[in-house]
């Protein structure tokens, strides 16, 4: 059975996710998304993965959430606050989401994964660092190339448009 | 004590919320929010299964790579949103027919 801390973190994470999609003010939605990402980091702490949790806070709450917040401030419009989604589309969305949730929950409940004994080993920072720098170093290099390409692409997208205006 | 079923339940809930956002919303930024929520649900599932069933450093390292990839994807999407806003003064995906400029 889940304890009180788990329920609180669940409330923050799921509440933040719902608010990020349903809040009429876009800036509040971005802040709520940051709260939801922070809740995911708390889940990583609960799962004995502190390195992943700190990485999640650094990258998501520190970088991505701030990037999203500034973009929202850049492109925000007043008319978004008044726009109401069609009730039919919303009903369809809720039904589809409920169907997927029920399907996943039933298939998880039917699986025998939960009968397996829980393990007690906790990987250390040293093991993660050793793995990244030895066996998985090709993946790290490819990832660095992908990140560089994405940053270059983002800069190019923003730059060409400015030159055309003159 | 928390069990594996609790974490998979939360992950399923977040994934369903993301699906709802992808279906209902027309704003490109809201779609980005929904995708981020779904990616985080997948990462949570990954770490939960890794911790409970076969705890080692490989699973956590894989999630680190996943987070970095999601950050790259978010930066590209935000650049596209800014360009679309400059061209059309709106980021409604149902009205964006061209992104060619």
Image: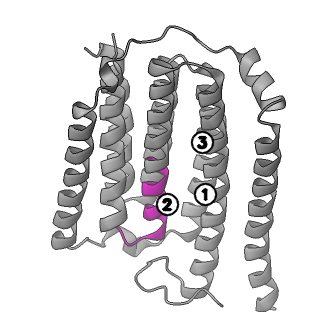
Residue A99 marker: none
Residue A27 appears in the rendering: no
Residue at the spot x=32%, y=41% of the render?
Answer: B12
Residue beneath disc 3: A60
Per the image, label 1 sits on a secondary structure element best described as helix
Residue beneath disc 2: B32
Per the image, label 3 sits on a secondary structure element best described as helix
User: In the rendered structure, the residue with mark 2 lies on which chain?
Assistant: B
Residue at the spot x=81%, y=65% of the render?
Answer: A152
In this picture, which residue range is highlighted in magenta? B24-37
Q: Position of residue A77 (x, y in %)?
A: 46, 72
| C-alpha separation, residue under disc 2 versus residue under disc 3 | 13 Å
Look at the image and say whether residue B27 sits in the magenta stretch.
yes
Q: Position of residue A85 (x, y in %)?
A: 25, 71
Residue A160 appears in the rendering: yes
Task: Please identify the dominant SS of the magenta region.
Answer: helix
Residue B74 marker: 1
């Amino acid at each position: 059975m889940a304890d009180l801390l788990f329920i609180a973190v669940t409330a923050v994470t799921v509440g933040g996710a719902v608010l990020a999609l349903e809040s009429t003010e876009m800036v509040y939605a971005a802040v709520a998304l940051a709260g939801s990402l922070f809740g995911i980091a708390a889940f990583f702490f609960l799962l004995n993965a502190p390195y992943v949790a700190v990485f999640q806070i650094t990258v998501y709450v520190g970088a991505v959430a701030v990037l999203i917040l500034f973009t929202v401030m850049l492109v925000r419009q007043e008319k978004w606050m008044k726009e109401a989604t069609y009730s039919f589309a919303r009903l369809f969305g809720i039904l589809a989401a409920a169907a997927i949730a029920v399907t996943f929950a039933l298939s998880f409940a039917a699986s025998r994964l939960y009968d397996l004994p829980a393990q007690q080993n906790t990987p250390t920072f040293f093991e993660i660092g050793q793995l990244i720098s030895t066996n998985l170093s090709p993946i790290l290099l490819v990832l660095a190339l992908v990140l560089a390409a994405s940053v270059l692409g983002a800069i190019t997208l923003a730059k060409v448009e400015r030159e055309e205006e003159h | 004590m928390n069990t594996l079923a609790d974490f998979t339940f939360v992950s399923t809930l977040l994934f369903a919320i993301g699906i709802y956002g992808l279906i209902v919303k027309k704003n490109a930024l809201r779609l980005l929010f929904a995708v981020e929520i779904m990616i985080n649900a997948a990462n949570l599932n990954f770490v939960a299964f890794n911790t409970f069933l076969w705890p080692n450093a490989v699973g956590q390292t894989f999630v680190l790579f996943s987070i970095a990839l999601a950050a790259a994807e978010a930066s590209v999407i935000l650049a596209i949103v800014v360009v679309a806003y400059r061209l059309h003064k709106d980021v409604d995906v149902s009205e964006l027919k061209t992104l060619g400029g």
